[in-house]
Image (spheres, rainbow, N blue to C red):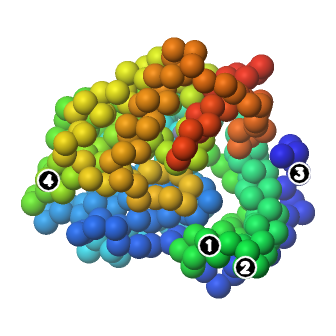
């Protein structure tokens, strides 16, 4: 993927102008996916008293109005970690919780070039989409309406995209229980992708929200503050804690949002192999075009640092 830094000339209308920016789908009782397809998946969990939005996405459209429209009550935010693609809409909300190790970075200015770099990635995504869709229409028929890549919203100007810092109003720790009335969410601290990464689990309904700890494409373990050994411990801990209770795993990136519990086993085994040196790597590049090494597994892969440490994503 070529690095493209000039985003001014992008034809942002070339994808699917008829789709709304957010793809909304009910996943379970009072659980909704609010996706930005090709970018990030956010989740709304509604209880009898309160509702929680797990992550606020890129911040290019008003996720608060979508979430509150679905919930019919005030919505509090929990961030799975501090990265901009999960916290971009935080500025729309009053009540924001994050693991205590992420609060400082959430409130800091983003690294130089991150916003423009991500918009360059977005341009590449939209450019690549037309050819991908044409092949799919002819041969594969895997794409469905809810996975269509769409142009950035009308009125949004990519050259003006900014990553806006936000202030946490509540700090989370491992084992905290977030009470929504008739349901509750348990916080699991799962460092590895970033020091502050968490998963949320709805024990009663057997649902695990994996943040960026579990994903079905490349799992990013190559970032400056990623830690592969911590990742191995965190994912092993998920298996130990949850293998008898979790039935479905919802992930924050890529199109295969809804997965069976076996995904966490596969990912934990993958990290164990990486720690043991029992994998082969291929060279690849991450979404900001930094070189990485990639270990590939059946339903996911893992990026580890290549020649140059990557910035935070
Ligand atoms: Zn992340
Ligand atoms: Zn992410």
Kindly identify which numbered label has been placed on residue 204.
4
Could you tell me which quadrant the C terminus lies in? top right
Residue 75: image location, x then y, percent: 30, 61
- Name the residue nearer the viewer: 289 or 91: 289
| Residue for badge 1 | 143
The answer to whether 298 appears left or right of 262 in the picture is right
Helix, strand or loop under label 2: helix
The part of the image, by quadrant, that contains residue 51 is bottom left
Residue 205: image location, x then y, percent: 18, 57
Kindly identify which numbered label has been placed on residue 6.
3
Cα separation between marks 4 and 1: 32 Å
Residue 306: image location, x then y, percent: 73, 23
The answer to whether 4 appears left or right of 165 in the picture is right
Helix, strand or loop under label 4: loop
- Tag in front: 3 or 4: 4
| Residue for badge 2 | 137
Residue 132: image location, x then y, percent: 76, 67
The answer to whether 112 appears left or right of 278 in the picture is right
Reply above or below: 20 against 47: below
Reply above or below: 290 against 115: above
Q: Are marks 2 and 1 in contact (CB under 8 Å)?
A: yes
Looking at the image, is mark 2 or mark 1 earlier in the sequence? Answer: 2
Cα separation between marks 1 and 3: 29 Å
The part of the image, by quadrant, that contains residue 195 is top left
Q: Are marks 3 and 2 in contact (CB under 8 Å)?
A: no
How would you rate the neighbour count of disc 2 (Cα within 10 Å): few for under 14, some for 14-19, many for 20 or more? few
Looking at the image, is mark 2 or mark 4 earlier in the sequence? Answer: 2
Cα separation between marks 3 and 2: 31 Å
Residue at image x 71%, y 47%?
A: 118
Reply above or below: 189 against 230: below
Residue 14 visible within the image:
yes
> How many labels sit on residues?
4
């Amino acid at each position: 993927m070529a690095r493209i830094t000039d985003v001014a000339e992008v034809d942002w209308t070339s994808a699917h102008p008829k789709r709304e920016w957010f793809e909304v789908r009910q996943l379970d009782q009072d659980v909704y996916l609010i996706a930005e397809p090709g970018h990030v998946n956010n989740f709304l969990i509604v209880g009898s008293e309160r509702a929680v939005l797990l992550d606020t996405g890129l911040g290019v459209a008003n996720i608060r109005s979508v979430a509150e429209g679905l919930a019919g009550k005030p919505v509090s935010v929990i961030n799975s970690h501090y990265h901009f693609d999960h916290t971009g809409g935080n500025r729309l909300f009053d009540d924001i919780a994050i693991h205590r190790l992420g609060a400082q970075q959430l409130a800091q200015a983003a690294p130089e070039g991150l916003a423009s770099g991500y918009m360059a990635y977005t341009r590449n995504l939209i450019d690549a989409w037309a050819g991908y869709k044409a092949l799919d229409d002819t041969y594969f028929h895997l794409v469905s309406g809810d996975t269509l890549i769409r142009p950035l919203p009308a009125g949004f100007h990519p050259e003006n995209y900014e990553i806006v810092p936000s202030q946490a109003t509540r700090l989370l720790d491992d084992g905290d229980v977030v009470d929504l009335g008739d349901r509750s969410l348990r916080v699991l601290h799962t460092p590895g992708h970033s020091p502050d990464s968490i998963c949320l689990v709805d024990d009663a309904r057997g649902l695990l929200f994996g943040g960026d700890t579990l994903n079905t494409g490349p799992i990013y373990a190559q970032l400056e503050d990623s830690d592969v050994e911590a990742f191995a411990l965190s994912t092993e801990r998920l298996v130990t804690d949850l293998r008898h209770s979790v039935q479905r795993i919802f992930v924050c990136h890529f199109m295969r949002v809804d997965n069976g519990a076996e995904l966490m086993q596969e990912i934990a085994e993958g990290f164990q192999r990486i720690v043991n040196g029992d994998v082969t790597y291929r060279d690849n590049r991450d979404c900001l075009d930094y070189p990485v090494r990639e270990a590939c597994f059946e339903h996911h892969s893992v990026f580890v640092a290549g020649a140059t440490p990557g910035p935070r994503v």
